[in-house]
Image (spheres, helix red, strand yellow):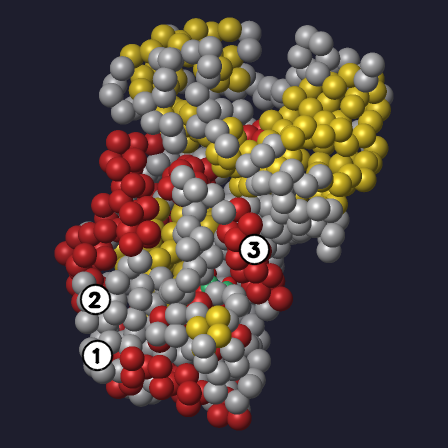
Amino acid sequence: MSFSPCLRRMSLGLLGAIALSLGLAAPAASAEVVGRPNETPEQRDARMKWWREARFGLFIHWGVYAVPAGTYNGQQIGGIGEWIMNRGKIPVAEYKAFARQFNPVRYDPDAWVRLAKEAGMKYIVITSKHHDGFALFDSKATDWDVVDATPYGKDVLAPLAEACRKHGLRLGFYYSQAQDWNHPGGAAAGGHWDPAQDGDMDAYLRNIAVPQVREILSNYGKLSVLWWDTPTDMTKERAEMLLPLLDLQPGIITNNRLGGGYAGDLSTPEQRIPATGTPGRDWETCMTMNGTWGYKSYDHNWKPTETLIRNLVDIASKGGNYLLNVGPTALGEIPPPSVERLQEIGKWMKVNGDSIYATTASPFSRLAWGRCTKKVGDERTTLYLHVFEWPADGKLLVPGLRNNVRRARLLANDERLDATNTPEGVVIDVPAKPLDPIDTVIVLRVRGELDIEKVLPTQADDGTMALPAPLAETHSEGGSSPQVEDIGGKASIGYWTNDRAWLSWQFKIARPGTFDVLAEIATTASASKFEIAVAGEKLAAQAPNTGDYRKFETVMLGRVRIANAGDCELTIKPVRGQWSPINLRSIVLKPAQ
Ligand code: FHN
């Protein structure tokens, strides 16, 4: 598969930057109200049950922005497609004129729902109204909606709701409550550029947001999710104008983006997968397949299916859900590259869905060869071992697993595999080749309680400490996170566009000393700067330009002294403002001669 890291990296980085600069999607602070008021933990668990089992959903960003599709007045407007009105400072009247070309005659809601279902998705969340204020339903509160403002003239949510019911998928609506660039008073959050936007936010909430939220919660039958977005300027009082409406749908699940101190049911990391999930809190990573949520005709920066499948697995292994986005065109078509990817994911899910649905987070901290999901029963625990890197010697080590195990099996074809307990953990004899190079799943059933000893990677016999990409924890202080992906045939860290994102490795040093720090790097940047910290020492380093994002070179970054034996952490952090994306395959600490 062809790879254009530079482009993909830039657009993801931009996304992060936009979200950050707007202060969007702030994580829930601990003082916030979680869940619904007056609900017992048991009632909450019952309400969340389907969602926790679903693990995988489809996000749909669809609206008038699909008409300009990223281009305004002959110019390609930077940033994400659905923000074109804001980024291009398009006057309200001019933007509204695009609606006359929004005529989705090829819209086939049944086909959309079938596509999601065949991909293995269990729910759909669609933008009932995004920041441009345009409603995909027939709203009595405004005529800025699909029925009154477009030649299509029909509500598009009703047939989608019907198709979801028919095919057994849950439906959710996204609603931009605080940010509305078309209705007076709604543009406070996103900035003004047209006097037509002037007005009072409370009046906007009273006259537009409240009646519209009542409409979407009343007119489409059972609704499973209300996905608020961009809570800027949402005080407690403002949030409480909307909150009581949720009683219209008693079982509904909401996210953490209402604002006003209401954390809802789940946190919503955007375009990133948290390093360890968010233990004790339900969470859902929403992510684009290319670099935009709303359709942009020239964004061809598609993530490979391998990345999308491994993201889903990674997220499930951390106890979260994956809400994967498509941005249909103004004609009502889901772009073919999205369709292809969903179909490919569906093929994998048909075989391996058991290892995703209703699973909980991995009991292991990090696995060099992949990820683990689990199902805990009364007497047994089923471990699903997701092998991304197939062991060349035919032995898969499940590190630190102390339960007695004799057998495992391949999920795809039920082939039995021998397993042996060793001092390092359970070793499974696997076939020479993986059944699926993206992720072959091995099922291991364990009796009684799980008994796992945390095993940190240690030095090789010659004292070398290898820290490969898959063992890295990724962190982000805002914006996107780097990801492990196959680059040039080996697992490497990619998508590292964000200078607020960093990596760490935990390991054990038995033989301390002085080490050369070597890194396997690929980049086309000439002076990407970062800092390595280990055992109290810091190393300022710079990546060399290797000429290609797939061409890795081993570079010596400097020397560090690790004085004491014991557990260690090594971090690598970009120097802010002096960072350009690099791909990283490994860090190696080599005893200095
Ligand atoms: O500004 C929006 C963006 O357009 C998109 O809808 C994403 C999806 O999570 N939410 C906002 C940014 O956080």
Type of amino acid under label 2: Tyr
Q: Is residue 114 left or right of residue 563?
A: left
- Residue depicted at 31% across the width and 41% down the height: 345
Query: Between 387 and 2, which is closer to the camera in this rendering?
Result: 2
Please name the residue that numbered disc 3 is placed on: 10
Residue at point 78%, 39% (across, down): 541
Q: Is mark 3 on a helix, strand or loop?
A: helix
Label at residue 107: 2
- The local crowd at label 1, few if under 14, some if 14 to 19, many if 20 or more residues have their Cα within 10 Å, is some
Q: Label 3: how many residues lie within 10 Å, few (<14), some (14-19) or many (20+)?
A: many
Q: Distance between the residues labelled 2 and 3?
A: 31 Å
> Which label sits in the foreground, 2 or 3?
3
- What is the quadrant of residue 374 in the picture? top left
- Amino acid carrying label 1: it is Tyr
Q: In this view, does 419 lie to the left or right of 478?
A: left
Give the amino acid at mark 3.
Answer: Met
Is mark 2 in CB contact (under 8 Å) with mark 1? yes
Q: Which of marks 2 and 3 is nearer the N terminus?
A: 3
Badge 2 density bin: few <14, some 14–19, many ≥20, Cα 10 Å? some
Q: Is residue 347 above or below residue 243?
A: above
Residue 456: image location, x then y, percent: 63, 21
State the residue lying farthest toward the front: 547
Q: Write down the quadrant of residue 442 in the picture.
A: top left
Query: Observer-nearest residue: 304 or 211?
Result: 304
Question: Which residue is disc 1 drawn over?
Answer: 152
Position of the C terminus by quadrant: top right
97 sits to left or right of 265? left
| Residue at 19% from the left image edge and 67% from the top image edge | 106
User: Mark 1 or mark 3, which is nearer the start of the sequence?
Assistant: 3
Of the two numbered discs 2 and 1 on the same chain, state the one appearing first in sequence.
2
| In the image, the residue with mark 3 has its CB under 8 Å from the nearest atom of ligand 1 | no
Quadrant for the N terminus, please.
top left
